[in-house]
Image (cartoon, rainbow, N blue to C red):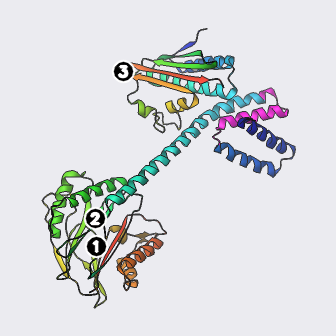
């Protein structure tokens, strides 16, 4: 028997059973029937005809006028039928878009990938989690021959695909900086020119660029409007802000950046982050900086990567597992 | 038989539907397919009435390899469609209605072809085969 005929037969059975004694069982079977109809893409207008045909076949007493009324019902359901088919098509399109974005996100991961450097005197940890599929956060490490570890952390204002596209550009401009070591303020000045020339004026990028000299254990850094980092003094067990002021990238091509420095002793920790960390939002509002530092302190004795992972877990929990902004946290711990 | 209806006002849409229904019935289309054919005619005629001002809808019988079908031809000398791809895309109907417009018509029939030149008009050919 053809599928449609089988459906017609089934419908007739259900209807017959219900007409006999209005039992709940028949109503439950109807529910199952409609599920199956949807699965097999039977549109609403066809159901009307199923019903009318079943009435006729069962010989249920119906006035001729009554049967004609189904013409009106059928006509009215036509538009619902078209809308239903459109909906199914849009769903397929959405699926396709979704998998396309997934491919793009994977590609972004490869493009923006960076290796955490291995240095004797430093324990380095990093975590970066996008709020949506594609990230507008970016971090990058460079370990040069002259024993300096450079770290860049950037955030495009905005998220999703536009932010991600913008980030790829930043990555390439950093890669194309001429070889050799650059002072953080020079790097920012150079990137600022690239961004100013190439990016839509409504899009802004913040960046923190730091360079850790492993000979004199001094951290040199500059910031382009980026979220301030923190410095943990092992001796006093206190946090202090890594103060650095500077204009966002892409605002004015003549911007000069100031460079700051901080000497690190064994056990001291440098923490860099994107605003997805500090602007972690719960239903009671943004979390306080002290709350964040509290979490960090709780895990401060662990290895750098573990601290980063644990702090992320805590904040994720705090936000009910709903990230509103891209989250990036980098930890550099001087171990000797 | 006279198989074309000129569309100049809203009542002509009803005449076009009636013509389509009669032919569909004669050819032996079932109730649901009749409703699909008339809905498609309705949409096409309505587009002429709303956007072109005037034009005509013709209904013809066709045969191919033993199959019988019904052809709907919609023709107007209106402003034409600037972006056909967009007009055929779901969710972009200018009338704003869910599922309405040309993609809706395309789904109701088995074959659908459209040709439109901005400034000259639009020609649409839709075929529904008898199953």
Secondary structure beneath dot 1 equals: loop
User: Which quadrant holds residue A132?
Assistant: bottom left
Which portion, as a residue range, is magenta?
A40-65
Q: Which residue is drawn at 76% across and 33% down?
A: A52
- Whether A57 is among the magenta residues is yes
Q: Residue at x 48, y 44 (%)?
A: A93
Same subunit: marks 3 and 2: no
How many marks the image carries: the answer is 3
Describe residue A21's horizontal placement relative to residue B97 as left or right. Answer: right
Disc 1 and disc 3: Cα gap in Å? 65 Å
Q: Mark 3 points at which residue?
A: B119
> Can residue A147 be seen by looking at this rendering?
yes
Tag 3 subunit: B
Most extreme residue toward the front, as rendered?
A145
Disc 3 and disc 2: Cα gap in Å? 51 Å
Disc 1 and disc 2: Cα gap in Å? 18 Å
Secondary structure beneath dot 3 equals: loop
Q: Which residue is drawn at 20% across and 64% down?
A: A247
Tag 2 subunit: A
Q: Are marks 3 and 2 in contact (CB under 8 Å)?
A: no
Same subunit: marks 1 and 2: yes
Which callout, 1 or 2, points to the residue nearer the camera?
1
Same subunit: marks 1 and 3: no
Which callout, 1 or 3, points to the residue nearer the camera?
1
Q: Position of residue A206 (x, y in %)?
A: 26, 64
Q: Mark 1 points at which residue?
A: A117
Figure quadrant of the N terminus of chain A: top right
- In the image, residue A211 sits, relative to residue A33, either above or below, namely below
Q: Mark 2 points at which residue?
A: A154
């Amino acid at each position: 028997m053809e599928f449609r005929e089988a459906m017609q037969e089934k419908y007739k059975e259900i209807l017959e059973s219900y007409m006999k004694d209005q039992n709940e069982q028949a109503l439950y079977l109807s529910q199952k029937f409609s599920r199956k109809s949807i699965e097999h893409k039977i549109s609403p207008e066809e159901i009307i005809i199923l019903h009318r045909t079943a009435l006729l076949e069962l010989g249920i007493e119906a006035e001729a006028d009554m049967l004609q009324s189904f013409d009106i019902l059928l006509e009215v359901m036509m538009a619902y039928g078209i809308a239903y088919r459109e909906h199914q098509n849009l769903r397929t399109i959405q699926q396709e878009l979704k998998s396309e974005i997934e491919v793009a996100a994977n590609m972004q991961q490869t493009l923006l990938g960076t290796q955490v450097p291995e240095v004797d005197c430093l324990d380095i940890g990093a975590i970066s989690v996008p709020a949506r599929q594609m990230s507008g956060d970016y971090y990058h490490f460079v370990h040069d021959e002259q024993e300096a570890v450079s770290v860049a952390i950037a955030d495009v204002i905005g998220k999703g695909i536009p932010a991600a596209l913008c980030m790829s550009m930043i990555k390439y401009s950093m890669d194309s900086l001429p070889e050799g070591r650059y002072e953080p303020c020079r790097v920012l000045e150079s990137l600022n020119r690239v961004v100013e020339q190439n990016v839509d004026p409504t899009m802004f990028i913040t960046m923190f660029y730091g360079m850790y000299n492993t000979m004199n254990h001094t951290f040199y850094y500059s910031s382009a409007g980026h979220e301030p980092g923190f410095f943990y003094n092992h001796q006093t067990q206190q946090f202090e802000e890594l103060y650095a002021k500077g204009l966002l990238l892409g605002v004015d091509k003549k911007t000069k950046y100031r460079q700051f420095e901080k000497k690190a002793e064994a056990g001291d920790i440098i923490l860099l982050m994107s605003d997805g960390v500090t602007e972690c939002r719960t239903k009671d509002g943004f979390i306080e900086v002290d709350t964040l530092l509290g979490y960090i302190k709780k895990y401060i004795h662990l290895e750098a990567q573990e601290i980063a992972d644990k702090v992320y877990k805590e904040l994720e929990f705090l936000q009910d597992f709903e990230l509103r902004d891209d989250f990036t946290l980098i930890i550099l711990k001087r171990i000797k | 038989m006279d198989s074309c209806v000129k569309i100049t006002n809203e009542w002509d849409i009803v005449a076009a539907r009636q013509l389509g229904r009669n032919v569909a019935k004669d050819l032996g289309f079932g109730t649901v397919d009749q409703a699909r054919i008339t809905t498609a005619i309705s949409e096409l005629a309505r587009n002429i009435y709303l956007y072109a001002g005037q034009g005509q809808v013709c209904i013809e019988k066709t045969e191919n390899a033993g199959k019988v079908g019904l052809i709907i031809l919609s023709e107007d000398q209106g402003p034409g469609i600037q972006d056909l791809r967009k007009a055929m895309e779901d969710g972009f109907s200018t009338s704003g209605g869910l599922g309405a417009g040309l993609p809706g018509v395309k789904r109701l029939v088995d074959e659908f072809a459209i040709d439109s030149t901005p400034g000259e008009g639009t020609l649409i050919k839709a075929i529904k085969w008898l199953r």
